[in-house]
Image (spheres, rainbow, N blue to C red):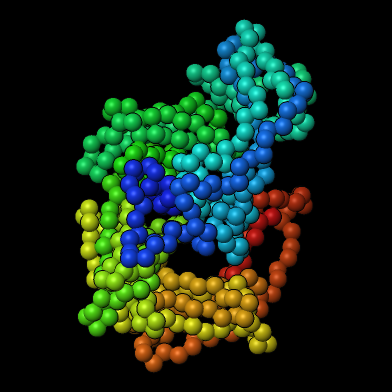
Amino acid sequence: MRKGTRLGVVLGVLALLLGLGLSMRSGQPAPSLQRQSQAVRPDTRLLPAPPPRPEGDLHVRGVVLGEQGPAPRVRVSATRAEAGHTLSTLSCGDLLQRHDELPARLSDCLDEAASAVLELVLSRQGEALVYAETVTADDGSFSLEGLPDGDFTLWAADSRRAGMWPDIAAGAEGLTLRLGARRWLEGLVSGEDGVPLAGVRVTALHTEHTRFFDTVSGTDGRYRLGPLPLADYRVALSKEGWLPELTHGAPYEETTLRRPRRLVVRVRSQGAPAAGAEVRLRRLEDARGASPIHLAEQVATTDAEGRVTFEPLWPFVHRLTASLGTSHAIARVEPHAPETQVVLELGNALRVEGTVRDREGRPVAGARVRAHLAGESEEAHEATTDTAGHYLLGPLARGSHAFQVFASGYLTEEPRWLKLGPETGPVDFVLAPAAPIEGQVVDEEGRPLAGFLLSSSCPRVRLAWRATT
C-alpha cells in the first residue's frame, strides 16, 4: 500500500466543494486567485464549451467475445475527443500556460499539471463526448448507430471484464472485440483523525482518452472502481467541507482528506500597519516533502490595518511574501491550526533583477532564472526573462543564494553563489551556446528505434536538453 500523492487545485472550485466563501480578504475588492495570469472563478469554464455534437447516419457493428465466447449484456460505447475541448488533446503548455520546453503531451506532465487536471475533473470538464451507447445481444452482437464520419474509441465492460479499442472508423462492420485483461482501483479514504470518510466522490480519469469513471466511498471509507481497461489513471477524491486530492491511481491507495485552514497575515512597516501591501502565498511542500508541481500563487492586498486572509489552505509549508514599494518581507508558514496568524515586518527581503545575454551581447528571451538558499533547492524562486532579456526575481531572503539559468539552446552552467544584501545590484548572466547533437538510434540489425529518451552531461557543465527518438 502506498499513500496517494497530494496535489494542488485552483481554489475557485474548492470554494464550491467546501461550501465556503473563497476569501482573500482586504479593505479593497480581493483579486481572484490566478493560475498564471488568467483569473479563475467558480462560475467560469476553464475550457471552452464543446461544439454541438454532430449527427450522422453511420454505424459501427461487431461482436464482443469473452473467455467462453460471445458475451451478452455487455455495455458498449463510442467516444471521440474534440481538439481544444477534451483534456487529452491539450498540451502541457495549454494547461500550465507556459511554453518553456514543456513536453507536448499531457500524459508526460500530469504531475506538474495536476492542479489544472484536478480542477477540470472536479468541474466535469474535458471528458470525451459519448456519441453512441448500446448493450450486446445474447449472441454478443452490437450496433452503434447515428455516428458522424471519423474515428472513435470503443469501450466495452460488464461486471467482470473490460476493454478499449481506439481508432475505429465510423462505418466499420464485422468487428471482433475481445474482453481481456482489466484492472480495479480500490482504496480507503480517511480524515485527519484516521476515521474513515463515507460519501467521498471518487472519479477515475483515463489519462489517454479522457473518460471519467465514478463511485462513492462506503460507510467504511472504502471504494472500488472497475472493471476498467488496462491503462494509466488518476483518481480525484472530493467531499463537501474537505480539501480534494488527486492520486496516481495505484491498484490500492490510502488517502487522507484534510479540513481547510485559514491564514491571517498582518504586514507592518517599522511597527505600523502597512496598508496596500501586495501579499503572495505559494504552497511549497506536502507532508512527504517538496511538491513536484507548479502551484498557482494566491495574491491579495492588505487593508487599512495591514491585514489579509487566505483560505482555504492545505496544512503544508507555504512561502509568504509581502511588498510595498521598495520594501519586502518573506516567511515560511505551515498552517496546522484551523486558523494561523502571522506578522510580516517589511525589510527582511529584497528583489533581484538583471539581464541574460548570449556571448554576442544579444538578450535571451524566455530564459528561466532560479535562485535558492543553501539547502533549500526545492524551494527555489523562479522568473522568466522578457524580450529584452530582463528578469525580476523575489522577494528573496537576505543571505547566500545559488543562482542558475536555464534556456533552450544554451549550456546550463553550475550554480553561481551570491550573498544578497542592501548593496546587491543587478545580477547579469552570459550564456554559452549549446552545440546540437544529431544522430540515429538503431538496433543490432540497423533498424531505427523509436521512443528512446536521450540525455547528455559532462564534468563541467550540464547540457540543457533531453530528446526522444
Q: Residue at x 49, y 25 (%)?
A: 227
* Closer to the camera in the image, 440 or 155: 155
Q: Residue furthest top?
A: 138
Query: For the N terminus, which image quadrant?
Result: top left
Instruction: Give the answer, above or below, for where 35 lies relative to 110.
Output: below
Q: Quadrant of residue 89?
A: top right
Q: Quadrant of residue 348?
A: bottom left
Side of 27 relative to 177 (left or right): left
Q: Residue at x 33, y 69 (%)?
A: 302
Q: Which percent across, then down, holds residue 442?
A: 73, 53
Side of 63 relative to 223 (left or right): right
Q: Which percent across, then down, holds residue 360?
A: 68, 87
Q: Residue at x 39, y 39 (%)?
A: 237
Query: For the C terminus, which image quadrant?
Result: bottom right
* Closer to the camera in the image, 31 or 29: 29
How many marks do you count on the picture?
0
Residue 368 visible in the picture: yes
